[in-house]
Amino acid sequence: MMIRRSARSKGGNDDGNSRNNTNRNSGNLSVPRGHLETKLEANIERIKTEVAASPDLIVRRFTLRTGQHQHVAAVYLETITDKETVNEFVMRSLMSPFLPEIPEGGATPEEAFKYICDNALAVGQVEVLDNWTTMLLELLTGKTLLFVDGWDQCISCSTIGGDKRAVSEASTQVVIRGPKDSFTESLPTNIALIRRRIRSEKFGFEAIKIGRVTQTNVAMLYIEGIVKEEIKQEVRKRLEKIDTDAILESGYIEEFIEDNWSSPFPTIYNTERPDVIAANLLEGRIAIVVDGTPFALVVPTILPQFFASAEDYYQRYDIGTFLRLLRYAAFVISLFGPAVYIALTTFHQEMLPTTLLINLSGAREGVPFPALIEAFAMELSFEILREAGVRMPRAVGQAVSIVGALVLGEAAVQAGIVSPIMVIVVSITAIANFSIAAYNLAITARLLRFLFMIAAGMLGFYGIILGFIMLVAHMNALRSFGVSFLSPLVPFKFKQLKDVFVRLPHWSFTERPDDTSDNTTRMPSGQKPQT
């Protein structure tokens, strides 16, 4: 699917200006007058012309109970509106026989328009619009527009609806103990899930529309008084600089606002769990929620976030610490497992016990390829099987990946193409990769694994150590909205190590990270609460 994109700098077109002038907090719109026609039919015909080939465009004409028979029209798109709300709280309210007539002297178009706004609508949110671009955007987001013949303004009624997925359990960040709800593709639903957890008047968000064609709603969430003002301004600035035709998923936003696009490490965290977003907001971070996707973004991001699971905080601290250390070990195995095997069997056989070396030599007897080629072939085969299992239909995908791995591994060993120990190494590496909490960090480990394998095949452990030094130097240079990617290790902050490699009890967390929070105090006292 190809989508045309322009330069990242802001253009000077009218659509961009209209998008950027839209208020962030859904209050009144400040728009110039004179963009709508005064004639009812002229406005309707123009809408039909601009909303091309839209059979779902509904135009309902009726007459108000006035002495001069004031003509009114309701316009909406039935596929993205709540038709029950339109029928019950807009149409029935305006056409009700119990609705009193407009008093004498109030039959002019202006008085009829004001009467509808003040007395005749039962919907919760009503706005007056007189800008054509804004009016058309409101129609395309699912709102109902009311036009009065003879008046150059329209009324926008909040009737957004249409089919949407219900709240369900998270599919990528599963926990045994903890909340089971997850984000959906509906922005209002996602914000509501967070509001249920943070019942504070300090919780707020700013809304912006991004994408000249899609006009996607994007919300920037934070807690006032906790978030750093300079980080909030930087996030807002980067979002407003995005100039593209379409935003179809939060991954589009991620690529536009990340600090270092060439790094294999993700510097923006994503999650589909509202409890994770709430916890990050309480630490002073900012969440970016995009309409149309269940994955929200969190900035700034540091490396320890990718090793923490939500369940670490719902289990006892000793269990959470054990599981977290296990993930760190799994990341190391996933990154260096095949490379260490290649270095030992190719350059450093003297480091192995004699019995193990004899067994390895016997297992590799008859294998025609060096260890580097053998490892590359097995890793590539497993990656292809894993991708096939993901892309195939769910009913057969898992069976194909498991059976394919067993059959190919056994056949390759029987044919003498690979050694049995290589199958074991690749299997342990793959299982360790699945243990990493963050999927995007697991992909990074899979990519870097091949580089370490090449380094081990050329220089042995010297190549691995050299590559590791370069990797640490690269991570040390990474920043996420001004925050060091290796924080709190670089720069070293001892007090913040309570939630990095280990997870201490909740009563010991007395301070928020000072990298992201202005108000670092969490509890008035660091003492363990009495029971």
Image (cartoon, rainbow, N blue to C red):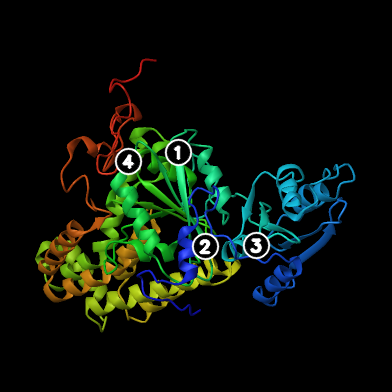
Q: Nearer the viewer, residue 527 or 8?
A: 8
Closer to the eye: label 2 or 4: 2
Residue 354 lies left or right of residue 207; in this view the side is: left
Check disc 4: other Cα within 10 Å, few if <14, some if 14-19, many if 20+: some
Q: Amino acid at mark 2?
A: Thr
Circle 2 residues within 10 Å: few <14, some 14–19, many ≥20: many
Mark linked to residue 424: none
Disc 1 secondary structure class: strand
Disc 4 versus disc 3: distance between alpha carbons? 53 Å
Indicate the amino acid at tag 3.
Answer: Leu
> Earlier along the polypeptide chain: callout 4 or callout 3?
3
For residue 113, side relative to residue 252 (left or right): right
Q: Which residue is mark 3?
A: 139
Q: Earlier in the sequence, mark 2 or mark 4?
A: 2
Q: How far is disc 1 from disc 4 in space, using C-alphas?
A: 34 Å
Determine the image quadrant of residue 527.
Answer: top left
**Mark 1 against mark 4, which lies toward the viewer?**
1
Residue 253 location (% of width, % of height)? 41, 63
Is 364 on the left-hand or right-hand side of 94? left
Q: At label 4, which amino acid type do we have? A: Phe
How many angstroms separate mark 1 from mark 2 (CA)? Answer: 22 Å
The span from disc 2 to disc 4 (Cα, nearest Å) is 42 Å
The residue lying at 50 percent from left, 57 percent from top is 22
Q: Which mark is residue 322?
A: 4
Q: Position of residue 134 (x, y in %)?
A: 57, 62
Residue at the spot of label 2: 216
Relative to residue 466, is residue 476 depicted above or below? above
- Between residues 336 and 145, which one lies in front from this camera angle? 145
Dot 1 or dot 2, earlier in sequence:
1
Question: Mark 2 and 3 residues: CB-CB less than 8 Å, in contact?
Answer: no
Q: Does residue 403 appear in this view?
A: no
Which residue does the numbered mark 1 point to in the structure image? 203
